[in-house]
Image: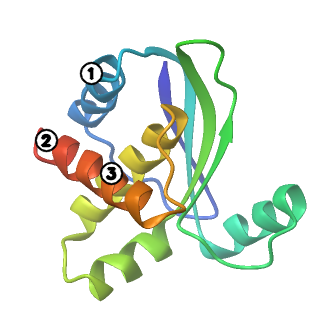
Amino acid sequence: MIQFFFENIDELAIEPSTTRWLEDLLYSEHKKVGDINYIFCDDEYVLKVNREYLQHDYYTDIITFDYVKGNTISADIFVSLPRIFENADTHSTASKIEMHRVLAHGLLHLCGYKDKTDMEIKEMRFKENFYLNKL
């Protein structure tokens, strides 16, 4: 089950079609939907999580805690809304599209895609754009 939670920010209206889109992404990657929690929060909350659990001292748009078992995708995914809005401005894209990109990005990592090398980044962007076009 995919659920959405909010910490230190006002609750957003998440359209049911977003949940179906995320589920379809996983099915297309031959994965099963487990317990997936998206926690939308502010920068300070993500920074606290980053420091406490990953020993990283910087802001980020997404942190994914992987609880995958076999082909069943389960995770806690922390998403910084201020980072999403800033990224949208930086890349001259709509904040709704950037939010969906980040939501998909987290799931793609859980499906095994990486983004450390240039080739991995290229593949990740291709997959993100592929799924964004299905919205």
Q: Which of label 2 and label 3 is nearer to you? A: 3
Closer to the chain start, of discs 2 and 3, is 3
**Circle 2 — which element?**
loop
- Real-space Cα separation, disc 1 to disc 3, in angstroms: 16 Å
Q: Secondary structure at mark 3?
A: helix
- Residue at image position (25%, 39%) is 15
Q: Is residue 69 left or right of residue 89?
A: right
Query: Disc 2 versus disc 3: distance between alpha carbons?
Result: 19 Å
Q: Earlier in the sequence, mark 2 or mark 1?
A: 1
Query: Can you say which quadrant of the picture contains the C terminus?
Result: top left
- Which residue is labeled 2 in the image? 135
Label 1 crowd (10 A; few <14 / some 14-19 / many >=20) = few
Residue 123 circle label: 3
The residue that disc 1 covers is: 28
Quadrant of residue 76 within the rendered picture: top right
**Residue 112, horizontal then vertical, whole percent:** 51, 35
How many discs appear?
3
Q: Amino acid at mark 1?
A: Ser
Whether residue 49 is situated above or below residue 36 in the rendered picture: below
User: What type is the residue that disc 2 sits on?
Assistant: Leu
**Res 57 label:** none
* Comparing labels 2 and 1, the label whose residue is closer to the camera: 1
Identified at 55% across, 28% down, the residue is 36
In which quarter of the view is residue 18 placed? top left
Q: Amino acid at mark 3?
A: Glu
